[in-house]
Structures are given as structure tokens and as C-alpha cells.
Image (cartoon, rainbow, N blue to C red):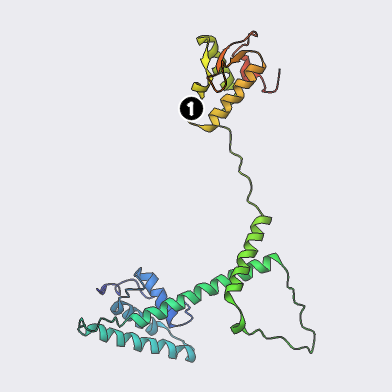
Amino acid sequence: MNEVQDLSVGPPVELAVFSGPLDLLLHLIRKNEVSIYDIPIFAICDQYNGHLRAMQELDLDVAGEFLWMAAWLLHLKSKMLLPQTAAEGEDPREELVERLLAYRRVKELASFLHDSDLVRRGLWGPAVAPPTAGGEETELDWEEVDLRLLAQTYLDVMQRFAAAHPPPLAVLPLRFNVQDSMRDLYSRVLDEGLVPLLRHLHSRSDPEEVVTMIVATLELVRLRGVFAEQRRPFAEIYLRPGDHRLDPEELLNRGVVNG
């Protein structure tokens, strides 16, 4: 695996609050946009030590973890400098990658539980009454919590919430007008004398336009402006002028339900 040598060259170190050395390493991996499965130890090690030097005040318990990780990174860096034989076939970074992946899963699960707690607080009030004076608080043993059951409960809550709060219905504006379609179809029947309706509908590819034309045809038949004829079942439907003369321009102002 090729190491990226120039990742350590960049802007000055920006300090942030990290919960531990693995959190800092994940930050550096994201910052350098490198794969967690192919960590450039040389650059990451230098940047990690740069963060340690830039930290002015450290809690003693946390400092030990950061310094231990720095020593481990230096150890990995030295092993990467040694020539690797084909017989060995083992990447010195493998254990570090496994720890980072496990930590990342725990961090994602913690964020998931935090979000589920926010949702629970938004849906229901506290079900447990506050302890009275002199009463003993019940301690929850987190080791006995079934995380899979908790995750499934969260999904059930979200589904109930989505069912009780459906998204608003989006009403799209009509792209075709029945009155316009009535005028165009009626003018065509007057000009041609006989119009094959089904063939005319099949020539349109937009379903909304087809529905509009069907409604316009039914309205013209109702007004006796056109007659519809079919010689046998499932055959072509022909439109011809009716016995009631309509003004094509007045169709624009005529409501569909008006006689």
C-alpha cells in the first residue's frame, strides 16, 4: 500500500474538542479525505503529534490515552519503514483499522440513540414521576439494555409519527384545459367531418392530455355539438358534427357542467 507523503503539508492545526484519540484519528482521516482501510501512517502520525503539541491544557486521564496512541502510531510508522516480505503478508495497520471501525460504529449508534431520545421527548412527556424527597433513584444498568429492541422501537415510533403526520398534499397546476380541448376538437370535427377518436387519442403520449380530451369529447356529446358512432364493439369511435351548432369561441367561456 502506497503512503501519501504530502498530507501533512496543509493549514495550521485547528484545535477541536475530541472525546479520545480514536475520535481525533477519525477527524484527521475525514480531513485528509483518505480511506480508513488505507491510512497514510506517516502523514497521520505527524498531524496527530501536531495536535498534541498544540494542546495547552489536557485532563490527565485523557492525556495518557492520547500519548499512548501517539506512541502506537510511531511504532506503526517504524514498522512501515521496514521492508515487508511476501511471507509475512500482514498489514501493521490492521489492528488500528479494526479499532477505528468499531469506534465509528459506536459513535454512530450513540448519535442514533441521541436522535431517538429527542423524538421520544417530542412525542411523549416523562412517564416516570420525579422522585420524592428522601426517595431512592433507580439506576439503569445499560449493559442489560437490548440495543436491537431499542432500535426497533425507534423505527416503530417513527412509523407511527409519519402515519399521524402525513406530508402535505401537493396539488400541481393543470397543464391542459378542457375548454381549450373542446374548442380544438370541435373545430377539427367541423373541418374534417369525421374524426377517428381512438386514433386521435393514441397519437397523444401524455396521459393527462388524453384524459382531458376524453372529458372534452363527453361534454361535446352532451351539448349535442358532435355525435359519436361505433359500428361494432371495440371498433373505432367516429365523431361527426351534431345537430346543435356551437360557437368555438364561446366554448372557452362555457363551464364543463353548464348546458
Residue 182 percent location from the top left of the image: 59, 19
Amino acid type of the residue that numbered disc 1 sits on in the rendered structure = Arg
Is residue 106 visible from the viewing direction of this image? yes
Quadrant where the N terminus sits is bottom left
Q: Position of residue 108 (x, y in %)?
A: 50, 72
User: What residue would you read off at disc 1?
Assistant: 204
Q: Where is residue 229 in the image (x, y as percent from the top left)?
A: 58, 15
84 left or right, relative to 162 = left
Vertical arrangement, residue 120 with respect to residue 52, above or below: above
Q: Residue at 35% across / 87% down in the picture?
A: 72
On the rendered image, what quadrant is the C terminus found in?
top right
Q: In which quarter of the image is residue 214?
A: top right
Check the image and report above or below for 55 versus 164: below
Name the residue located 62 percent from the left edge and 67 percent from the top edge.
154
Q: Camera-side residue: 184 or 70?
A: 184
Horizontal side of 174 relative to 92 (left or right) equals right
